[in-house]
Amino acid sequence: MVTIADCRRVQTGWFLLQARALGGEVWTDGPLTWIDGPDGQNLMFPREMTTAAVVRGVERARDRGRPIVGAWLDPAVDPAPLAEAGFERGWAPWWMTADLSRPIGRPAPGVELQEDTADYRETDPTYRELLALTRLRPARAWYAAAYTRSRRFAGRAWSFLDGDLAGIFDMEVWEPFRRRGFGTGLLHAVCEAARAAGARHAVLNATPEGERLYSACGFTRVGDDITWWLHLSD
């Protein structure tokens, strides 16, 4: 049975992989684990905190020029030190899981796995750097892109192998291309890649909008957490 603790472990593992493979930093400060990578600087699921320790992490983010600092939290943990350091309560990860013993989603024309891309050249040039994760060996991460018949870039998704769990991340279909089967096609592609590498279950955190798609593809909700955010540029 997949638990919320498993979901937290996979989320943390995904941030760790990005930081370690792409030149980020990981450090601990007592019970706090901070990860600074392509997704910014994040505090990952502390069991307890002090305001002083949180402030030290914020100062490190400020020194590194990070505009936003995130904190991922079990709702049972006292968030007062975050509030005292200026963080504001954010969105709630809705953890969902699915059994990979049967296919998730369905194949879709125009969805393909890639190890490099030129799709972000104009809109987000640094995103291409993330695809270095797909070239690690043994393979631990997979990226899928969706295209229309005219090769318009329609969406993307990632999966990441952590033990026998596959984390699904950064899945999105751009607004003009929704309800054409790309979402289920992307989900199928990255889940199948992870399943072939040994994953037995998939986990993800859903938004209210995404939950409808994931539920239709066999995912069930196992619990919620909460995020907190500090905008240093404000």
Image (spheres, grey):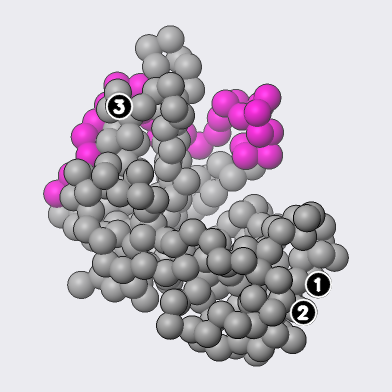
Q: Position of residue 108 (x, y in %)?
A: 27, 26
C-alpha distance separating marks 2 and 1:
5 Å
Most common secondary structure along the magenta stretch: loop
Hey, what amino acid is under mark 1? Glu
Screen quadrant of the N terminus: bottom left
The answer to whether any part of residue 196 appears in the image is: no
Query: Depth check: 99 or 194 in front?
Result: 99
Report whether residue 225 is seen: yes
CB within 8 Å, label 2 to label 1? yes
Displayed quadrant of residue 127: top right
Q: Residues within 10 Å of mark 3 (few under 14, many from 20)?
A: few
Q: Which residue is mark 3?
A: 179
Instruction: Look at label 2 and name its amino acid.
Output: Arg
Q: Amino acid at mark 3?
A: Arg
Question: Which contiguous range is marked in magenta?
Answer: 102-128
Q: Which mark is residue 56?
A: 2
Residue 111 is covered by the magenta coloring: yes
Residue carrying label 1: 59
